[in-house]
Image (spheres, helix red, strand yellow):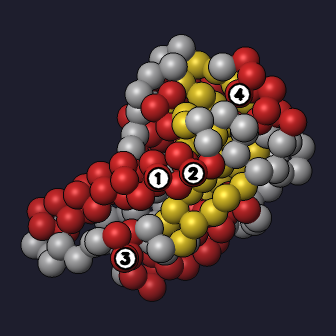
Amino acid sequence: MQKLKENLEQNGFSVYFAQDKKEALLLSKSFVDKAPSIGLGGSTTVVEIGLLNYILDKKDIKLYNQYENGISMQENTKRRREGMLADLYVCGCNAITQNGELVNADGSGNRVAAQIFGPKKLLIIVGKNKIVPTLEDGFARVLETAAVKNINRMNAKAQEAGKEPKYSINNIANKFAYINGDEIGRTHIIIVDKELGF
């Protein structure tokens, strides 16, 4: 893990380690509590550590929440765009290589776009299961693990809502981002010593 930390830091990322979900949430709060506005990228990991609920309960921030029940698709898209210019953007990551590279895929693209440019700061929470040896392994993990699990999750949610299950590899992972560096102090990565998310 120390070598991974060194490689990530050489690429301009700030790295923090958490032993469990509780510690990850505590670390995350230190970033969230300083942010006047927050954007969200879809992340099971963020939900699992309790961070999404913490953010939703905060009344002293401007939250661009595209997941709010009952909003129109037009409002959803508007909030995704606004979130990309927030003070802090909170999301997960599909894969991190031992060389310190981030690999992600999206359907709509707001999360990968925000990881590249837009928000003043980026907070990424990632479980140890997302760490892979090489860039090739990172792309394989996106397509063979993360995308498949997300397709199943999204189609199940659609069916629960009485909608057609329309998600597939062609629309859930069609925009990719490979990031091997960022402006120092912008991207903060919390690596949790637990298996989290997809």
Give the CA separation, mark 3 to mark 2: 20 Å
Q: Residue at x 74, y 22 (%)?
A: 3
Give the CA separation, mark 4 to mark 1: 19 Å
Q: Which residue is mark 4?
A: 4
Which of the two labelled residues, at mark 4 and mark 3, occupies the earlier sequence position? 4
Q: In the visual, does 184 lie left or right of 92?
A: right
Which of the two labelled residues, at mark 4 and mark 1, occupies the earlier sequence position? 4
Q: Amino acid at mark 3?
A: Asn
Which of the two labelled residues, at mark 3 and mark 1, occupies the earlier sequence position? 1
Q: Which mark is residue 136?
A: 2
Secondary structure, mark 1, is helix
Q: Which mark is residue 170?
A: 3
Q: Are the residues at dot 2 and dot 1 in contact (C-beta closer than 8 Å)?
A: yes
- Front residue of 135/60: it is 135
Q: Are the residues at dot 4 and dot 1 in contact (C-beta closer than 8 Å)?
A: no
Which of the two labelled residues, at mark 3 and mark 2, occupies the earlier sequence position? 2
